[in-house]
Image (cartoon, rainbow, N blue to C red):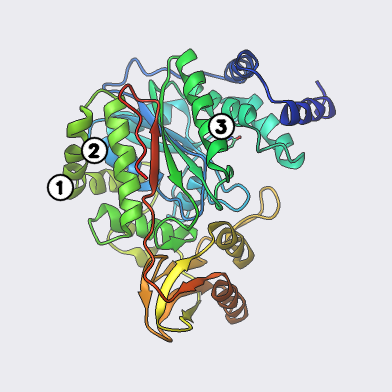
Amino acid sequence: MTDYHVSALLMAVYFQGMDAAETSALTRIMVESGETWSWEDVDGPVVDKHSTGGVGDKVSIPLAPLAAACGLKVPMVSGRGLGHTGGTLDKLESIPGYRVQLTREDFARLLRDVGYGMGGQTGTFAPLDREVYALRDVTATVESIPLITASIMSKKIAEGVSALASDVKWGDGAFMVAYEDAEGLARSMIRIGAEFDVRVEALMTRMDIPLGRTIGHALEIQESIALLRGEPVDERLRELVTALAERMLVLGGLAEASGARARVEEALASGRALELFRANVEAQGGDPGVVDDPSLLPSAPCRREVPAPAACWLARLPAREVGYALIDLGGGRRTKGADIDRAVGFELLRRPGEEVAVGEAWCVVHARTEDEAAVAAERLSELAVWSEEPVELKPIVTRELGGDSVQHTKS
Ligand code: URA
């Protein structure tokens, strides 16, 4: 089929949807369009995690070593930034020397020696998804549940994992803004997974404000390292990383639901997860010195503090607009394949739910020039919504779907 035939088909699917049989047929031809991996030679359950993408979402970076420290093998094939959301590969590449072009053999070596590897989709891996994805991007047909399901699941099935913990985001900064759409996507992925022998469980999570205290590639690596070092980090970020690690352990058969949290916390507290992160950086060609010395990461020449207008609480900071503000600072792409500046970004000294004094800095902008810093600082000031009353954030995980046990709603 020519590109214009495929584009017409995509537009028809976008408006008409696909039934279950059609979605699974599309997934199958995407899987079969390239090589498929299997891991019989690997000693341990092979489980992965996936996120539908958000702003400040650096979860995969600490989660993969944490899961590996608990005994799982994680061949994580990640993506680059898409729209207003950041990409794990782009973030990892802020570590000097870190290499994300991995072959099946590279992954096999990493799983054996370290327990996890993090790479990008290669030309031979679900290549049909790459072609179709590029056409969806330019025909405004990305946000379609069957097309997203086939795209995500084809890559995970080809990756050869036995189970997948999926972080399905909803809210202003997610691709699926409405909860019902996000749940529809989660259920569709769970169903396709079952057909292809990949057990999928989904955590439905809020993406209405940025996740954690940093937005920007090198800054997010620093925050991930801080989490692995056991330093105080945003508790919503820690909660999500821990909850996904628990799910992965249960899916991999390494723990019962009741014992998983203790195992995960022990792997973090013992420093084993941090050591595996260090080993992975070294094994993928990066400078492991970043673990002890964050100044080895790229840093922006200009910093500007954003002061609070009054003594009050930060009530909201819309995630999607913060994502766009990062692109405007040079930290995201406007065109395919464009260069990005991995040093720029935002550091939230206060995040929504926290109190500030009048004139106190609540955010630091990291920028290439004073002018860009001033523009971004002004924009962040306009985006922030303040309250005279204390503001309590709702729990980040709103629902778990797909497990054997009773699904429960946390709020
Ligand atoms: N991630 C993917 O890999 N594919 C999509 O369609 C959306 C998010």
Q: Is residue 62 above or below residue 319?
A: above
The reply, left or right, for residue 26 in relation to residue 205 is right
Compared to residue 105, the image places residue 287 above or below, namely below
What residue is pinned by disc 2? 69
Earlier sequence position, callout 2 versus callout 1: 2
Q: Secondary structure at mark 1?
A: loop
Eye-nearest disc, 3 or 1 = 1
Under mark 2, the amino acid is Ala
Question: In this image, 353 relative to 80: left or right?
Answer: left
Q: Position of residue 381 (x, y in %)?
A: 54, 76
Point out residue 38 in the picture as x, y percentages from the top left corner. 42, 17
User: According to the image, label 3 marks what residue?
Assistant: 122
The image shows residue 401, relative to residue 360, as above or below, that is: above
Label 1: which residue?
270
Q: Residue at point 22% right, 56% down? A: 230
Crowd around label 3: few <14 · some 14–19 · many ≥20 (10 Å): some
Residue nearest the observer in this picture, 72 or 234: 234
> Which comes sooner in the sequence, label 2 or label 3?
2
